[in-house]
Amino acid sequence: QPQLRESGGGLVQAGGSLRLSCTAPGTVLTFGWDRQAQGKMREEVARIYSGHRTGYITPVKGRFTISRDSGNTAYLQMDNLKPEDTGVYYCYARIDEGVSYHDYLGQGIQVTVSS
């Protein structure tokens, strides 16, 4: 089971910014971030695909930016944070394993936005 290492969460006031980082082993085809608020289902927040094409859920468009470096690290820049962005954020990685690929999630990192 590949280990995804997340960092950068924490507590911030509404309107503030945080930057999440995630490092994954191997050949990562797609990076992403999911989140889960208390009492709610986990949702996909952002994806960055091969060729650096990106996708976001509507509530974060224009505020969040996903990127990756030439290696195995992805970032989620979160600006103008809102209390409804509070939750556990999980790094997602689709890793090429030769004849197939598998999807993995990190352990999660807490993001709390106070009003």
Image (cartoon, rainbow, N blue to C red):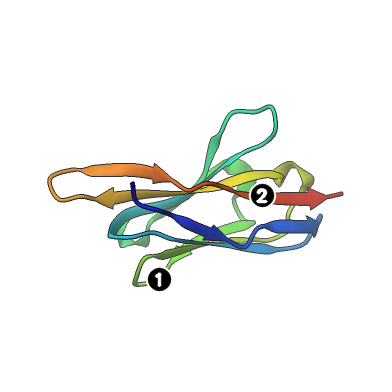
- For disc 1, the marked residue is 69
Report the Cα–Cα distance between label 1 and label 2: 23 Å
Note whether 71 is above or below 6 in the view shown. Answer: below
Q: Where is residue 111 in the image (x, y as percent from the top left)?
A: 69, 51
Within-10-Å neighbours for mark 2: few <14, some 14–19, many 20+: some
Mark 1 or 2: the one toward you: 2
From the viewer's perspective, tell me whether residue 63 is left or right of residue 114: left
Amino acid at circle 2: Gln
Say whether residue 48 is visible. Answer: no
Note whether 71 is above or below 14 in the view shown. Answer: below
Q: Where is residue 49 in the image (x, y as percent from the top left)?
A: 35, 54
Within-10-Å neighbours for mark 1: few <14, some 14–19, many 20+: few
Q: Which of 17 and 61 is in front in this view?
A: 17
User: Which quarter of the figure has residue 74?
Assistant: bottom left
- Name the residue located 62 percent from the left edge and 48 percent from the top edge: 60
Q: Position of residue 6 (x, y in %)?
A: 53, 58
From the viewer's perspective, tell me whether residue 64 is left or right of residue 39: left
Q: Nearer the viewer, residue 87 or 2?
A: 2
Mark 1 or mark 2, which has the lower sequence index? Answer: 1
- Name the residue located 12 percent from the left edge and 45 percent from the top edge: 99
* Farthest bottom residue in view: 70
- Name the residue located 15 percent from the left edge and 50 percent from the top edge: 98
- For disc 2, the marked residue is 110
Amino acid at circle 1: Asp
- Name the residue located 69 percent from the left edge and 27 percent from the top edge: 39
